[in-house]
């Protein structure tokens, strides 16, 4: 089985992107893997700090390893938005395939210094753990939004100069940038369009694969253009959370006497599976 680094390189060469989907519960892991098997592409399971605290850091690592072993399908585990070097070290020690050090709210100097410490730790681990850096603040919650998150500027996107400096000075493997994307989905409007030209410029300047965050609410056309412009991995969370919750709510309203979680959670997992399959086919050009 390819390493995550190899899988990303292959996807980039073939003009595809790998889907990254956030989970909170084990049934979501199974739903995502079922979809990935149907599509036949590698997939990344993502857990934010909150999601992995709920699941258990070592427990999610054990689950993904066991699913990978059983299915023989390339399923990778990423520690999503991680805000301290200590917590980056924790997931490297736990066996994750990749981790995002998110210093987007810090000064560029501080972000680089901490990013470099994460890269050094990963290289010393003896495993090929990918470190992703985050440049440019795009909001911090995967939720339904009334407005663009406070602190996000659609005018001040990540510049190619910042990307080049970050990549060179940290030695990071992947980079995510502010290119018109936001975390979460607007309730009453469409999410902003991506800046495809900027994606191209940042990819070229950084010289490392780019990750697109905030995949919920992005149009199909933007996804296709963004992947062509240099995006190799796409994160989706809010859409899955919204569908999961809606299905549970509807199932319980229809079946008020049901108390078996495996019965009332099943439709929620199936809803997640449908979205993941559809997104993966788009990202994979299938
Ligand atoms: O890291 C998580 C993603 O960037 C998810 O963004 O909730 O807007 O899909 P989203
Ligand atoms: Zn994100």
Image (cartoon, grey):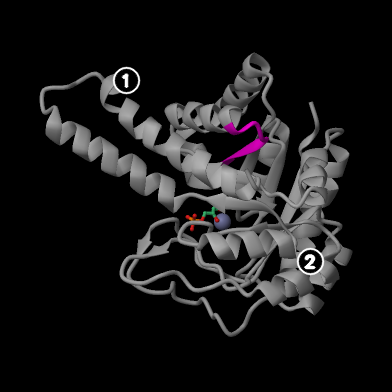
Q: Residue at x 52, y 33 (%)?
A: 32
SS type, badge 1? helix
Using the image as rendered, state which of residue 193 and residue 79 is in the foreground: 193
Using the image as rendered, state which of residue 113 and residue 220 is in the foreground: 220
Is 41 a magenta residue? Answer: yes
Would you name the residue on which mark 2 appears? 203
x%, y% of residue 265?
A: 31, 28
C-beta proximity under 8 Å, tags 2 and 1: no
x%, y% of residue 146?
A: 32, 70
Q: Quadrant of residue 60?
A: top right
From mark 2 to mark 1, how far is it between C-alphas? 44 Å
Which of the two labelled residues, at mark 2 and mark 1, occupies the earlier sequence position?
Answer: 2
| Residue furthest out toward the bottom | 155
x%, y% of residue 90?
A: 66, 39
Q: Quadrant of the N terminus?
A: top right
Would you name the residue on which mark 1 appears? 262
Q: Residue at x 35, y 48 (%)?
A: 242
> Is residue 146 left or right of 44 when viewed as pictured?
left
Can the viewer see residue 81 in this picture?
no
Q: Above or below — where is 69 with respect to 184?
A: above
Q: Residue at x 81, y 52 (%)?
A: 173
| Residue furthest out toward the left | 257
Q: Is the C-beta of the residue carrying label 1 under 8 Å from the nearest atom of ligand 1?
A: no
> Is residue 94 left or right of 171 when viewed as pictured?
left
Q: Residue at x 34, y 34 (%)?
A: 268
Magenta-tinted stretch: 39-46
SS type, badge 2? helix
Can the viewer see residue 44 in this picture?
yes
> Is residue 148 left or right of 72 when viewed as pictured?
left
Counting labels gives 2
């Amino acid at each position: 089985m390819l390493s995550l680094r190899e899988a990303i390189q292959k996807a980039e060469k073939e003009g595809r992107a790998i889907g990254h989907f956030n989970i909170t519960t084990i049934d979501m892991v199974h739903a995502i893997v079922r979809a990935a098997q149907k599509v036949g592409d590698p997939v990344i399971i993502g857990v934010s700090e909150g999601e992995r605290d709920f699941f258990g850091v070592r427990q999610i690592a054990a689950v993904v390893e066991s699913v990978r072993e059983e299915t023989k399908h390339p399923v990778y585990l990423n520690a999503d938005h991680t805000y301290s070097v200590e917590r980056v070290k924790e997931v490297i020690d736990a066996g994750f395939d990749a981790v995002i050090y998110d210093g987007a709210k810090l000064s560029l100097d501080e972000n680089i210094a901490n990013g470099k410490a994460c890269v050094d730790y990963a290289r010393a681990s003896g495993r090929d753990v990918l470190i992703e850096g985050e440049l440019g603040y795009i909001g911090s919650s995967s939720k339904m939004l009334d407005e663009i998150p406070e602190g996000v500027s659609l005018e001040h996107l990540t510049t190619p100069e910042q990307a080049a400096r970050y990549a060179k000075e940290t030695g990071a493997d992947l980079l995510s940038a502010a290119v018109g994307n936001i975390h979460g989905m607007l309730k009453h409007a469409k999410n902003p369009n991506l800046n495809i030209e900027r994606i191209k410029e940042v990819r070229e300047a950084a010289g490392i694969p780019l990750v697109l965050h905030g995949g919920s609410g992005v149009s199909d056309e933007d996804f296709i253009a963004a992947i062509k412009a240099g995006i190799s991995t796409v994160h989706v969370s809010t859409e899955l959370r919204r569908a999961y919750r809606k299905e549970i709510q509807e199932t319980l309203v229809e079946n008020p006497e049901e108390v078996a979680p495996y019965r009332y959670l099943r439709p929620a997992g199936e809803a997640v599976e449908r979205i993941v399959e559809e997104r993966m086919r788009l990202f994979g050009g299938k």
